[in-house]
Amino acid sequence: MPSKTKNEIVSAFLELIEREDFDRITVTDLVEMCDISRQTFYYHFDDIDQMLCYAFERETVKIYAAHEAENWTDYGEDYVSFFNRYDLLMRKAMKTTSFVLIYNLINNSFATCLRVYFEQKKGSQFASAKSTDYLINLLSGAFTAQIVNELQKDESNYDEMFSKLGTALTGYTAV
């Protein structure tokens, strides 16, 4: 099953990141750890960057598909879990040229979930309005910057960050 193999490759990367620098993990490392051929890796992904895109997209879909959002708290709890799992990966990526990729993946994840959240709360017309696009871009950019600030600390407090965002969004969507 292709998704099972893809998920195993992502899991291997998360395991390897615990003992290797981000930019030192190679396709060879991943195929050896997963006991698959290089051809199998390249069947699923063009490169490690594409594997990371898949990983972040998979997590994002899990977050927004799991909830009919009454409030952002449901999303926030899943994001806290996601970011706690990927914390070391994101921290190590900050020191590499892949940082821009990770930054964009975080930003896209927020933008996607915010759009789904607004659509569930206010309807598709609201979610597709130009002012909503602006708000989503503003919020996802600002929140991604907050994640980067958090990653620069010795220890991240994602719970507090998502709690504050939930409070702000609850006030906005109640209007």
Image (cartoon, rainbow, N blue to C red):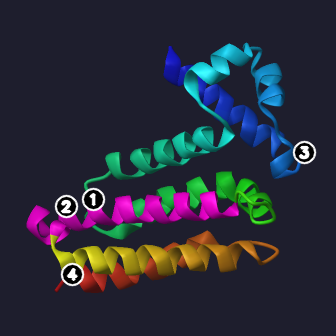
- Residue at the spot of label 3: 19
The picture quadrant where one finds residue 12 is: top right
Q: CA separation, marks 1 and 4?
A: 15 Å
Q: Secondary structure at mark 4?
A: helix
Q: Nearer the viewer, mark 4 or mark 2?
A: 4
Q: Is residue 63 visible?
A: yes
Closer to the chain start, of discs 3 and 2, is: 3
In this figure, what is the number of numbered marks? 4
Residues shaded magenta? 99-128
Q: CA separation, marks 3 and 4?
A: 45 Å
Find residue 27 and name its label. Answer: none
| Point 78% across, 39% down: residue | 15
Please tell me how crowded label 2 is: few (under 14), some (14-19), or many (20+) other residues with Cα within 10 Å: some
Closer to the chain start, of discs 3 and 4, is: 3
- Residue at the spot of label 4: 131
Q: Nearer the viewer, mark 3 or mark 2?
A: 3
Q: Amino acid at mark 3?
A: Arg
